[in-house]
Image (cartoon, grey):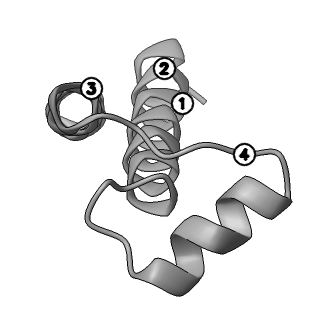
Amino acid sequence: MKSGLIRGLVLVLVGGFVIYWAITHSPKAGLGQIINNELSGSYTMSSGSYYASLIAGAILGLLGLLRVYKSMK
């Protein structure tokens, strides 16, 4: 495998994980999810860090897709 392809796939996975992590700690979660987070020792993110995490995950994912596309040429 090409190293660009591997790096691209890793970036896509990391970006997807960051988005998933942000969604599971969303400040817009329902009351049940917030209570579950508190009981399990987790937390709920502030609005600013939530949106920053979503944007960072999207950028990482898009960069990964671009790297995968370039390595397949």
Q: Label 3 vs label 1: CA separation?
A: 23 Å
Q: Secondary structure at mark 3?
A: helix
Q: Is residue 29 left or right of residue 47?
A: right
Who comes first in sequence, dot 4 or dot 2?
2
Q: Quadrant of the N terminus?
A: top right
Residue furthest to the right in view is 40
Badge 4 density bin: few <14, some 14–19, many ≥20, Cα 10 Å: few
- Disc 2 marks which residue? 7
Who comes first in sequence, dot 4 or dot 3?
4
Residue drawn at x 47%, y 56% is 20
Q: Which mark is residue 10?
A: 1
Disc count in the image?
A: 4
Between label 4 and label 2, give the one nearer the viewer: 4
Circles 4 and 3 in contact, beta carbons < 8 Å: no
Residue drawn at x 26%, y 38% is 50
- Disc 4 marks which residue? 42
Residue drawn at x 26%, y 26% is 49
Q: Is residue 24 left or right of residue 71?
A: right
- Disc 3 marks which residue? 49
Q: Label 1 vs label 2: CA separation?
A: 5 Å
Q: Secondary structure at mark 1?
A: helix
| Residue type, numbered disc 4 | Ser
Who comes first in sequence, dot 3 or dot 1?
1
x and y, in percent, of residue 35 in the image: 64, 70
Relative vertical location of residue 14 with respect to residue 23 in this rendering, above or below? above
Relative vertical location of residue 15 with respect to residue 6 in this rendering, above or below? below
Q: Is residue 53 left or right of residue 10?
A: left
Relative vertical location of residue 59 with respect to residue 40 in this rendering, above or below? above
Q: Label 2 vs label 3: CA separation?
A: 26 Å
Viewer-proximal residue among 54 and 36: 36
Between label 2 and label 3, give the one nearer the viewer: 3
Q: Secondary structure at mark 4?
A: loop
